[in-house]
Image (cartoon, grey):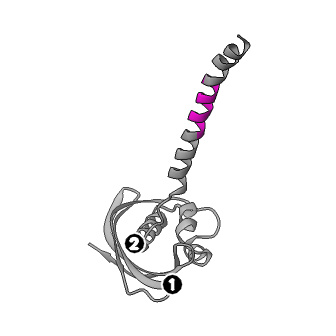
Amino acid sequence: MRWLTWLIFTVPLICIISAWVSYLYLNEEKVAVKQIPSIEDTARLFSEALYNKDYKTLSTYGTERAVASVTPPGEVKKEANVHIHNISVFISKQREGATKSIAVVERTIEVKGKSIDTTHYLELSMRKEKVWLVDEVRIIADIPK
């Protein structure tokens, strides 16, 4: 009789524990398999973060050198609203662990109720560490529409 009481309480407990362990194991695999961004994705996300003044995200997709070159010193006052319409990325041939890309950013800038549409061309020098990172940013042109 004693073993029957023990069995009634332990079997559900073992089932619950095994269900939790399998759930956590399966969920952990989904989290661990993060997709590594491609060169195009890195350039696009870096450019988007740059124009949205999201300096925390910039450091995810750029080296310290690149982030330092585009981050203004001190506090940033947001006097203009920037709306990005499209970002196109063109990649040159890759050398060993390095490549250059051109990011074409179509945007609208609004300052004090006045807006202008422009197309901004950026040259992004990129290098591969564990993932591709933007190492240098150079403005090629800013063309109003």
Q: In this rendering, does residue 136 appear at all?
A: no
Q: Which image quadrant for residue 120?
A: bottom left
x, y (%) of residue 128?
A: 53, 79
Alpha carbon separation for disc pair 1 and 2: 15 Å
Q: Earlier in the sequence, mark 1 or mark 2?
A: 2
Residue type highlighted by circle 2: Glu
* Residue extending furthest toward the top: 1
Mark number, residue 82 = none
Considering only vertical position in the picture, is 3 above or below 129? Answer: above
Residue drawn 42% across the image and 86% down it = 94
Considering only vertical position in the picture, is 135 above or below 23? Answer: below
x, y (%) of residue 98?
A: 49, 85
Q: Please give the residue where the numbered disc 1 appears in the rendered image.
A: 97
The residue segment tinted magenta is 12-21
Contact, CB < 8 Å: mark 1 with mark 2? no
The question of residue 9 being in magenta is answered with no
Residue type highlighted by circle 1: Gly
Q: Main secondary structure of the magenta part?
A: helix
Nearer to us: label 1 or label 2: 1
Q: Please give the residue where the numbered disc 2 appears in the rendered image.
A: 40
